[in-house]
Amino acid sequence: MFKELVLKNRSVRRYDNSFSISRKQLEDLVELARCSPCAANLQNLRFYLSCEEEFNQHIFKHVKWANYLRYWDGPAPQEAPSAYILILCSKDCGKFHLLDTGIAAQTMLLGATELGLSGCMIASMDKSAIQTALGLPEEYDLVLTIALGKAAEKIMLEDVIDPDDIEYYRDDEGVHHVPKRSLRDLIIDSGK
């Protein structure tokens, strides 16, 4: 059922790094993005695939993990993602590239979830350092990084109690809690 797939698709930040992901699996995820809708059918996005440790390390050391967890510097090496998909766009791609990026990223993450994998969209990173380390073409901007792997953490959704406090957190057992606003708080209508 589609709702179950959506509920299983969480932003995972700790992985079992001994688990490997093949380039073919990454290509299959990009194939899903390729077939997804995009603004004016311009197909401006490009994808860099990384599933080899050497290239993964160049990405891993330049991404920032979980801003709300101020005490946590990110995953330990054995908890690092097994693969990454970088989403790039030409510098003159127009105003809709962020919408296209969101559609492509969510589609790939749902596909990864269906395969039993987990992932995390990461926009907080040193983009120029990653572009330089990987030798990415200068005519493209790095828009988003998707980390992928086999989850090594438990994530729980819970209702928001204080509407001013939506920060995720980890409890003493390391369970990652993600507060979500209620449906009633999200829908704006005439009150019918």
Image (cartoon, rainbow, N blue to C red):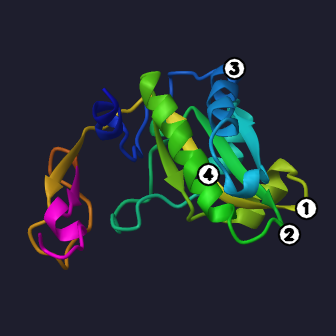
* Residue designated by label 4: 145
Q: CA distance from mark 3 to mark 2?
A: 30 Å
Ranked by sequence position, the earlier of labels 2 and 4 is 2
- Residue situated in front as seen by the camera: 117 or 107: 107
Please say if the residues under marks 4 and 3 sit with CB atoms less than 8 Å apart. no
Residue range in magenta is 177-192
* Residue designated by label 1: 138
Q: Secondary structure at mark 2?
A: loop
* Residue designated by label 2: 92
Q: CA distance from mark 1 to mark 2?
A: 12 Å
* Residue designated by label 3: 24
* Amino acid at the residue labelled 4: Thr
Q: Secondary structure at mark 4?
A: strand
Outermost residue, left direction?
A: 161
Residue 121 in the figure: left or right of residue 68 = right
Nearer mark to the viewer, of 2 and 4: 2
- Residue 68 falls in image quadrant: bottom left
What label sits on residue 86 in the rendered view?
Answer: none
Name the residue located 40 percent from the left edge and 47 percent from the top edge: 11
Ranked by sequence position, the earlier of labels 4 and 1 is 1
What is the count of numbered marks? 4
Name the residue located 70 percent from the left edge and 30 percent from the top edge: 52
Q: Residues within 10 Å of mark 4 (few under 14, many from 20)?
A: many
| Residue 4 versus residue 65 in the image, above or below | above
Q: CA distance from mark 2 to mark 4?
A: 20 Å
Ranked by sequence position, the earlier of labels 3 and 2 is 3
**Residue 184 inside the magenta-drawn segment:** yes
* Residue 33 coordinates in the image, percent (x, y): 64, 39
* Residue 83 coordinates in the image, percent (x, y): 61, 34
| Residue 120 versus residue 81 in the image, above or below | below
